[in-house]
Structure formats: C-alpha cells, structure tokens
Image: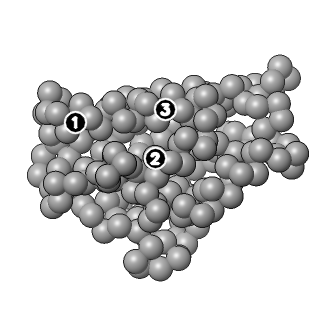
Amino acid sequence: MSTRPTSPLGEDYASTTERTGATLPFDDPRHLLAHRWLVDEAYLLDAQDYATWLDLLTDDIHYFMPVRVTTALGAGFDTARDMAHFDEDKYSLSRRVARFATEHAWTEDPPSRLRHHLSLVRTFATGSPDELVVDSAVLLFRSRGDVREPAIVSAGREDLLRSTPEGWRLARRTIMVDESVLRIQNLAVFL
C-alpha cells in the first residue's frame, strides 16, 4: 500500500506525512492509543453515529479509496489511474452524512446493519511527535433488510492520526479493498 495518496484534487490536498522506522511495539503507549482510537471509531460507524464520527476528522482530512485493478505480475500498479470510489475531503464527507438525515437517503432506508471487524493493527512513528501512521485490516459485514444477501468488504487501511487540542483526529485514510469487483449493492458506508 502506498504511503502517499494521489488525488486529482491537487498535490496539497493530502498530507505528505510518512512513516519512519519499524512498527512500534504492541505495548508502546502510542500503539495502544491508536488501537483504542480505531476500535472506538469502529463502534461509532457500526452505530451509524456519523455526526460524532465527523468530529473525529481533521479539517484537512483526505478519505481515499482507489479503484483496484488486476494486472500482470510486474506491471507496477494495481489501482486505476485517476479513478476512486472515494476521494473526499471534510466538506464532501459532511454532505454525505447530512444526506442520511433526509428522505432522499433511500439506500439506507431501512438502515443497514453494520459490523466493522478490525485486525492487524500496526503503528508507526512519523517525523512529528503529534502524528502516527496506522495500518489496519477491516472486514465490513453489511446486512440490508431481510431480502438481500449480506455483503462483505475486506480492505487494508493506512491512516494518519494527528494529535489536536481536542484529542486525536483522523487526518488521512487510504483504503485498499481486496477485490477489483466490489460485491456490495452500494457504497453508502464508511470504511
């Protein structure tokens, strides 16, 4: 997974902070803090408490999920150039959340039942003591009522967590799904 998201929105759209060194030990207070942050976030997303979730994002958040492609060994790429399922900032994320509260959010009426399964959390120091890079795996189970098969989305994530006066906040998320063809009815979810 790339540590530098690319975005058609411009070079200074996403933070350029990168990991330094090996993973932090699992008993390192920074790793424990990051792991707890991710678990708390997963519970908010499962409860669909998106207003509270938005408060956990920095104003310069870059939420990015490129389209995966299957290529020949040695091709040098595995994502479609300039294509993404999500390439969002704080404003666009807030508009998606606001839409859920309207009668136009038919993709979530009735609401999905969600469960984010979080694992393989690895934390890395950066050049700044106020930022951490965190890798994790997420498995999303989504059930849409009684008539459809449930959907499962598996992905790896690279996050940038930043310490702010209000606490730790998500400044960047790059989501690399494990399938080229997503088997989910729609993407009215957050990973």
Q: In which quarter of the view is residue 77 placed?
A: bottom left
- Residue under label 2: 56
Relative vertical location of residue 125 with respect to residue 123 in this rendering, above or below: below
Judged by depth in the image, the label closer to the viewer, 1 or 2, is 2
Given contact means CB atoms under 8 Å apart, are the residues at marks 1 and 2 in contact? Answer: no
Kindly report the distance in space between the C-alpha atoms of the residues bearing marks 3 and 1: 17 Å
Q: Relative to the observer, which residue lies in front, 82 or 39?
A: 39
Relative vertical location of residue 67 with respect to residue 118 in this rendering, above or below: below
Q: Position of residue 15 (x, y in %)?
A: 35, 67
Mark with earlier residue (3, 1): 1
Kindly report the distance in space between the C-alpha atoms of the residues bearing marks 2 and 3: 12 Å
Residue type at mark 3: give it: Ala
Q: Relative to the observer, which residue lies in front, 136 or 38?
A: 38
Judged by depth in the image, the label closer to the viewer, 2 or 3, is 2
Residue at disc 3, secondary structure: helix
Residue at disc 1, secondary structure: helix
Q: Position of residue 37 (x, y in %)?
A: 36, 36
Residue 42: mark = 3
Q: Position of residue 138 (x, y in %)?
A: 46, 35
From where the camera sits, is residue 173 visible? no
- Residue under label 1: 31
Given contact means CB atoms under 8 Å apart, are the residues at marks 3 and 1 in contact? Answer: no
Mark with earlier residue (2, 3): 3
Residue type at mark 2: give it: Leu
Q: Relative to the observer, which residue lies in front, 186 or 73?
A: 186
Question: Quick one: quadrant of the N terminus?
Answer: bottom left
